[in-house]
């Protein structure tokens, strides 16, 4: 059984290598490429390349010209590249403003985006204080009970929000976690109106945070910025005071992304 599994693994890697070779070959051509030429360049049988290209086309990584039958890169490749570029640009533009926010508040700043109903931490600047919030880049967190998550959920279309609630549920983490869908929707309406969200020990008992939306040039909320720290330092009164600083920093980042509005 071990030998069989190893063989299957090697075969899978070989198929992946060949598929990536196809994408890289198509990327190097300004014009669509004939299947026979693609097979010749890669040193593969035409039927093998046809099977691989058909799979890539079904997943939209490759497109076939209806008139000529030739192949070129598909929109999915562009989408992935755009996603990566936008995330990199977002992090680069946000970092100095996050550092300024940390200098002002002495608490940890996070930048997060929404992915399948969860928040992903894509950038952070640590608090200089000894006692601080622990987090990791790439870590996922529930959206319904975190400051950044509530900011991001608050700006979704209602149908999409309902879908995510159905998919993820509203798990209780602490006694303050909102677990009723209608109560959450009312809460998110207030978040939209005031321009920030507060996590009042809703995800972790000893942590509070305040978050605000980051928008792009199309007025879309593409990320959330937050300040987090121990509840012993971040009282509810202090969070209310820090909200203006977080909103201002989020607006500065939004301006760098081409946003022309007034925030909120």
Image: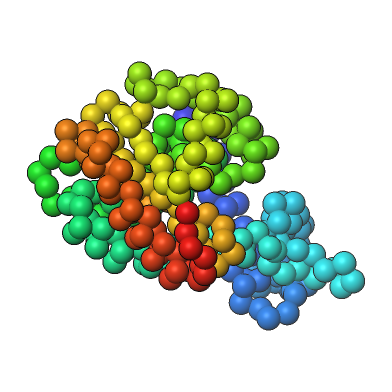
Please provide percent x and percent y for residue 136. Answer: 30, 44
- Residue 37 in view here: yes
Q: How many numbered marks does the figure carry?
A: 0
User: Could you say which is closer to the camera, residue 92 or residue 249?
Assistant: 249
Instruction: Locate residue 243, reporting x and y percent.
Output: 33, 49
Q: Nearer the viewer, residue 8 or 264?
A: 264
> Which residue is situated farthest in the left direction here?
130
Give coordinates of residue 225: x percent, y percent.
38, 52
Q: Would you say 120 lies left or right of 160 here?
A: left
Percent position of residue 171, x then y: 46, 22
Closer-to-camera residue (78/216): 216
Measuring 29% from the left and 59% from the top, which residue is drawn there?
A: 98
Q: Is 31 on the left or on the right of 14, as rendered?
A: right
From this viewpoint, is residue 137 visible? no
Residue at 22% over, 36% down = 235
Figure quadrant of residue 119: top left
Q: Is residue 192 above or below residue 86?
A: above
Q: Is residue 176 left or right of residue 102?
A: right
**Residue most toward the bottom?**
30
> How is the protein colored in the picture?
rainbow
Residue pictured at 36% horizontal, 63% vertical: 94
Instruction: Using the image as rendered, state which of residue 21 and residue 136 is in the foreground.
Output: 136
Residue at screen point 66% across, 71% down: 26
Q: Is residue 94 above or below residue 203?
A: below
């Amino acid at each position: 059984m071990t030998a069989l599994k190893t063989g299957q693994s090697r075969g899978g890697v070989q198929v992946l290598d060949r598929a990536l070779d196809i994408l890289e070959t198509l990327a190097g051509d300004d014009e669509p490429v004939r299947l026979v030429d693609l097979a010749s360049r890669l040193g593969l049988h035409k039927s093998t390349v046809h099977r691989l290209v058909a799979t890539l086309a079904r997943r939209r990584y490759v497109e076939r010209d209806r008139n000529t039958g030739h192949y070129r890169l598909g929109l999915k490749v562009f989408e992935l590249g755009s996603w990566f570029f936008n995330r990199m640009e977002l992090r680069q533009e946000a970092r100095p403003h996050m550092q300024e926010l940390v200098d002002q508040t002495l608490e940890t700043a996070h930048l997060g985006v929404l992915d399948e109903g969860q928040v992903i931490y894509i950038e952070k600047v640590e608090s200089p204080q000894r006692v601080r919030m622990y987090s990791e880049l790439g870590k996922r967190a529930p959206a319904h009970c975190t400051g950044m998550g509530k900011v991001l959920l608050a700006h979704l279309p209602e149908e999409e929000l309902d879908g995510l609630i159905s998919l993820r549920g509203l798990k209780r983490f602490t006694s303050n976690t909102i677990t009723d869908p209608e109560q959450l929707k009312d809460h998110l309406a207030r978040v939209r109106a005031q321009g920030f969200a507060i996590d009042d020990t809703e995800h972790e008992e000893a942590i509070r945070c305040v978050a605000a939306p980051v928008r792009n040039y199309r007025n879309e909320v593409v990320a959330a910025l937050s300040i987090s720290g121990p509840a012993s330092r971040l009282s509810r009164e202090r969070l209310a005071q820090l909200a203006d600083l977080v909103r201002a920093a989020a607006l500065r980042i939004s301006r760098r992304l081409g946003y022309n509005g007034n925030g909120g």
